[in-house]
C-alpha cells in the first residue's frame, strides 16, 4: 500500500476552503482535520472536505489535539497574519512536549507581518526539524507554469534570457475585517498581495531548474497610495462593513514595486509588480508578462474563454460563483471555472504533499518566505523614504511599516 499523508488545516476561512476544493486534484493525501477559534466555521470546513470526498475531516478543539492525533502528518497554516506566531508556538510546544509528531508544515503567504516575525517563525519550526513549504499558489498556476517552460525552452534558449517580467493582482478589497487593519495584517495591499506578484516576477526571470538565488534582488523602488478607500464616501462605507476607519488609520489600497535583479551570468533584469484593492472590474484579476530579446508571453486570468451575459431582468443575490471577488451580477461576465486550479492551488498542494512524503524537493520553503518578507519591507522603506533602496534595506530586521504602526498618512 502506498503511503498517504494526513493533513490538518489551521484556519477555516476563505483560503482554507480554496485548498480543500483544490484537494480534488491531489493524490496521496487526505484532509483529515480543521482547527479554528471559530468552532462552527471549523466544523463547516471539515464538512466541505467530507462532501467533496477529499478526506474524513473533523474539527479539532485545539492545535495541540490535531498535532497529537497520529492520523495527522502535516499542517497547512492558513490562519490570519496576527495569529501566525502563536499558532506556530503551539505546534512547536506540542511536538517538543512529546504530544505528537509531524512530517512537515506548509504556510500561506506572507510568512509573517515583518522580518522579525518571519525569522521567528522559521527558527521555531527549524527547532523541531520539520520540512517546510511556503505556499505561493501563483507560481503553480497552469498558465504561468506552461508559459515559463515554453519561453525558456524556445525563446531564451535561442535568443537569450528574458530581461523584463511584470505581474499584478487586483480586486475590489478583501473579504474579512482583519485584512483592512494595518496593525493586525501588517500593512495594506503591499503586504497582503505583493508577496504574490514580487515572487512571480522573480520566478519568471529565473531559469527553470535553477534556484531563485541565481536572480538576486539588488535595488527596490516602492510606492504606496490610498486611492479609493480613504475618500469620505468610501471610508464611511468601509467603516460600516469592515469596521476599519480609514479617515484615522488608513492602509494603502494600491502598491507598485520595481525590483532590479542581477543574474548569475552577469545580466541586469527588471521585475515590475502592482497590486490593488481599488480595482473595479468583474472580480479578481491576475496577470503576468515575460519579455526577452525576441519573444514575450502574457496571461490575464479574466481572459478565461468563457463569458456569460445576464440582462437587467435577471436578478438575484450577490455571489462569487463566476469569479473570486465578483463585483456584478448583470451584463457580460467572464467565468473562471475551477478557480482553485486556475490560480495554482491544486498544483502547489500536490507539490507539497509530495515534498512531505519525500518524493520531491521543495520549490519554496520558509527561508524563501523570509526572503519575500524582506523584499516587502524594503519596498515599504522605499515608499516611506521616496527613494530607491538597496536590497535588503538598512535595519530591515527590526523595521515595521508606518501603515502597520498606524502613523502613515496618504
Image (tube, rainbow, N blue to C red):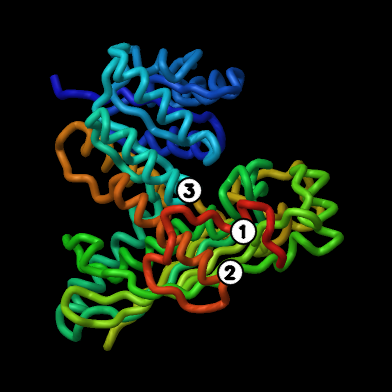
Which mark is on residue 258? none
Characterize the local packing of mark 2: few (<14), some (14-19) or many (20 or more) Cα atoms within 10 angstroms.
Answer: some
How far is mark 3 from mark 2, CA to CA? 35 Å
Q: Image quarter for residue 159? A: bottom left
Pointer 2: what residue?
Answer: 384
- Name the residue rendered at 68%, 42% in the picture: 177
Secondary element under disc 2, as helix, strand or loop, is helix
Secondary element under disc 3, as helix, strand or loop, is helix
Residue 298 in sight here: no
Pointer 3: what residue?
Answer: 339
How far is mark 1 from mark 2, CA to CA? 8 Å
Q: Are marks 1 and 2 in contact (CB under 8 Å)?
A: yes
Q: Earlier in the sequence, mark 3 or mark 2?
A: 3
- Name the residue rendered at 54%, 53% in the picture: 192
- Name the residue rendered at 35%, 25% in the picture: 92
Pointer 1: what residue?
Answer: 402
Q: Are marks 3 and 2 in contact (CB under 8 Å)?
A: no
Q: Image quarter for residue 401? A: bottom right
Q: Earlier in the sequence, mark 1 or mark 2?
A: 2
Viewed as shown, does residue 42 lie left or right of 345? right
Which is closer to the viewer, label 3 or label 2? Answer: 2
Residue 90 location, x and y as percent? 42, 23
Amino acid at each position: 500500500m502506498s503511503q498517504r499523508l494526513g493533513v490538518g488545516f489551521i484556519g477555516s476561512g476563505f483560503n482554507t476552503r480554496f485548498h480543500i476544493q483544490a484537494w480534488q486534484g491531489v493524490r496521496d493525501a487526505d484532509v483529515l482535520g480543521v482547527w479554528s477559534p471559530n468552532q462552527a466555521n471549523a466544523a463547516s470546513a471539515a464538512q466541505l472536505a467530507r462532501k467533496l470526498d477529499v478526506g474524513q475531516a473533523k474539527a479539532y478543539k485545539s492545535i495541540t489535539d490535531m498535532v497529537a492525533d497520529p492520523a495527522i502528518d502535516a499542517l497547512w497554516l492558513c490562519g490570519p497574519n496576527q495569529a501566525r506566531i502563536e499558532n506556530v508556538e503551539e505546534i512547536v510546544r506540542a511536538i517538543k512536549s512529546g504530544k505528537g509528531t509531524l512530517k512537515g508544515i506548509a504556510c500561506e503567504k506572507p510568512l509573517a507581518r515583518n522580518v522579525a516575525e518571519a525569522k521567528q517563525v522559521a527558527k521555531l519550526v527549524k527547532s523541531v526539524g520539520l520540512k517546510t513549504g511556503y505556499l505561493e499558489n501563483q507560481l503553480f498556476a497552469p498558465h504561468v507554469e506552461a508559459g515559463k517552460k515554453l519561453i525558456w525552452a524556445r525563446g531564451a534558449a535561442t535568443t537569450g534570457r528574458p530581461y523584463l517580467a511584470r505581474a499584478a493582482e487586483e480586486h475590489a478589497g478583501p473579504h474579512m475585517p482583519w485584512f483592512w487593519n494595518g496593525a493586525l495584517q501588517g500593512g495594506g495591499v503591499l503586504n497582503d498581495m505583493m508577496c504574490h506578484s514580487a515572487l512571480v516576477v522573480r520566478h519568471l526571470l529565473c531559469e527553470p531548474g535553477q534556484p531563485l538565488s541565481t536572480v538576486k534582488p539588488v535595488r527596490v523602488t516602492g510606492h504606496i497610495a490610498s486611492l479609493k478607500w480613504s475618500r469620505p464616501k468610501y471610508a464611511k462605507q468601509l467603516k460600516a462593513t469592515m469596521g476599519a476607519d480609514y479617515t484615522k488609520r488608513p492602509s494603502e489600497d494600491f502598491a507598485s514595486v520595481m525590483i532590479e535583479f542581477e543574474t548569475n551570468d552577469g545580466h541586469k533584469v527588471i521585475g515590475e509588480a502592482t497590486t490593488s484593492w481599488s480595482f473595479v472590474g468583474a472580480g479578481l484579476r491576475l496577470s503576468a508578462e515575460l519579455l526577452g530579446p525576441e519573444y514575450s508571453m502574457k496571461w490575464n486570468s479574466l481572459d478565461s474563454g468563457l463569458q456569460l451575459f445576464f440582462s437587467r431582468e435577471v436578478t438575484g443575490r450577490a455571489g462569487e460563483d463566476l469569479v473570486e471577488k465578483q463585483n456584478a451580477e448583470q451584463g457580460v461576465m467572464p467565468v473562471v471555472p475551477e478557480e482553485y486550479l486556475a490560480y495554482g492551488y491544486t498544483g502547489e498542494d500536490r507539490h507539497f504533499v509530495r515534498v512531505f512524503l519525500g518524493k520531491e524537493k521543495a520549490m519554496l520553503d520558509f527561508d524563501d518566505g523570509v526572503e519575500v518578507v524582506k523584499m516587502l519591507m524594503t519596498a515599504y522603506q522605499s515608499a516611506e523614504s521616496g527613494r530607491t533602496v538597496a536590497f535588503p534595506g538598512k535595519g530591515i530586521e527590526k523595521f515595521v511599516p508606518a501603515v502597520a504602526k498606524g502613523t502613515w498618512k496618504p
